[in-house]
């Protein structure tokens, strides 16, 4: 493996000390820089051209990507990109970044990314509850953590709010937006079942109060074959006695009140509140 290949493995940026530890000589590092294959960002730090800005910023700050900033590097759902970089640093600070302290697992060495457990624990303490729940649900569905495992690492009163977020996670969503919708409906006291198999219809995203089907449409629902399938499911639902509402990402995330108003308009026809 040459310097270039190792940097790709390391996330495109690394300290020269990391390269030396991996067995590369100072000469091989200098040769890679001279050839233009590698860029020296400053003394002691090199990167591939076009290295990810977030990874570069983490190494320059002597830290690790963490919390919402680490989510895509772990393959986790993330509702919104964070406005500021989230870094796990043992000491010091970085201008404009949200700094997290404390670690319970090794990092994703040699990538400058905090371990999955640290990423989730800091998200639970730091992010709005819905955004943290989205990340945890993603990891749970991948079989990479459990709620009990995380709960045990959030002891004491100071972690009470973080533990409460875990109560929002149940591992039934197929996407980040379905987590948001589920929490939106349940926050209103609506009896909500998820991923329900209905005879003659198939599996629906949500069944509210036993009769209102709510489907959350992703980009695949714009494809011709899927449009035809959705039309058939909608017709079958109506003929079987169910009401149906469909929403997209923008509806649920940016206009949740409109979604709730329409849901309640249907529910109030049969449900006494």
Image: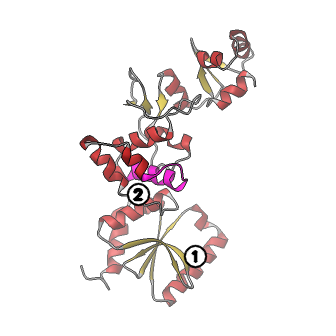
Q: Name the chief secondary structure element in magenta.
A: helix
Where, quadrant-wise, is the C terminus in this rendering?
bottom left
Residue depth check, mark 1 versus mark 2: number of the one nearer the observer: 2
* Between 141 and 154, the one nearer to me in the picture: 154
Quarter of the figure with residue 86: top left
**Residue 7, relative to residue 240: is it above or below?**
above
Helix, strand or loop at label 2? It is: loop
Residue found 43% across the figure and 39% down from its top = 67
In the image, which disc is placed on residue 169?
Answer: 2
Q: CA distance from mark 1 to mark 2?
A: 28 Å
Q: Residue at x 41, y 47 (%)?
A: 150
Q: Look at the image and give the residue range highlighted in magenta.
A: 130-147
Q: Is residue 93 above or below residue 224?
A: above
| Chosen colour scheme | secondary structure
Query: To which residue does mark 1 refer?
Result: 230
Question: Foreground: 89 or 211?
Answer: 89
> Where residue 169 sits in the image (x, y, percent)?
41, 57
Task: Bin the neighbour count of mark 2 within 10 Å (Cα to Cα): few under 14, some 14-19, many 20 and up.
Answer: many
Q: Which mark is residue 195?
A: none
Mark earlier in primary sequence (1, 2): 2
Q: Position of residue 39 (x, y in %)?
A: 65, 19
Q: Quadrant of residue 42?
A: top right
Which class describes the residues within 10 Å of circle 1: few (<14), some (14-19), or many (20+)? some
């Amino acid at each position: 493996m040459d310097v270039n290949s190792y940097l790709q493995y390391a996330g495109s940026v690394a300290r020269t000390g990391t390269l030396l530890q991996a067995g590369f000589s100072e000469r091989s590092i200098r040769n890679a820089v001279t050839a233009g294959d590698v860029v020296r960002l400053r003394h002691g730090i090199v990167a591939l051209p076009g290295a990810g800005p977030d990874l570069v910023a983490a190494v320059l700050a002597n830290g690790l990507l963490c919390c919402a900033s680490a989510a895509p590097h772990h393959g986790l759902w993330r509702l919104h990109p964070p406005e500021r970089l989230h870094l796990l640093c043992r000491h010091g600070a970085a201008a404009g970044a949200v700094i997290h302290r404390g670690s319970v697992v090794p990092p994703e060495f040699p990538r400058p990314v905090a371990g999955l457990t640290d990423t989730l624990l800091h998200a639970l303490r730091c992010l709005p509850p819905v955004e943290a729940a989205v990340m945890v649900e993603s990891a749970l569905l991948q079989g990479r953590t459990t709620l009990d495992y995380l709960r045990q690492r959030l002891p004491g009163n100071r972690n009470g709010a973080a533990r409460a977020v875990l109560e929002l996670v149940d591992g039934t969503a197929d996407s980040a937006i379905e987590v948001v919708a589920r929490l939106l409906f349940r926050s209103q006291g609506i009896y909500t079942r998820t991923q329900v198999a209905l005879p003659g219809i198939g599996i629906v995203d949500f069944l509210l109060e036993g009769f209102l089907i709510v489907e959350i449409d992703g980009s695949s629902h714009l494809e011709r074959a899927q449009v035809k399938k959705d039309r058939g499911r909608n017709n079958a639902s109506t003929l079987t006695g169910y009401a149906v509402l469909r929403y997209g990402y923008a509806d649920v995330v940016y206009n949740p009140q409109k979604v709730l108003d329409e849901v309640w308009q249907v529910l109030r026809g049969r449900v006494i509140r």
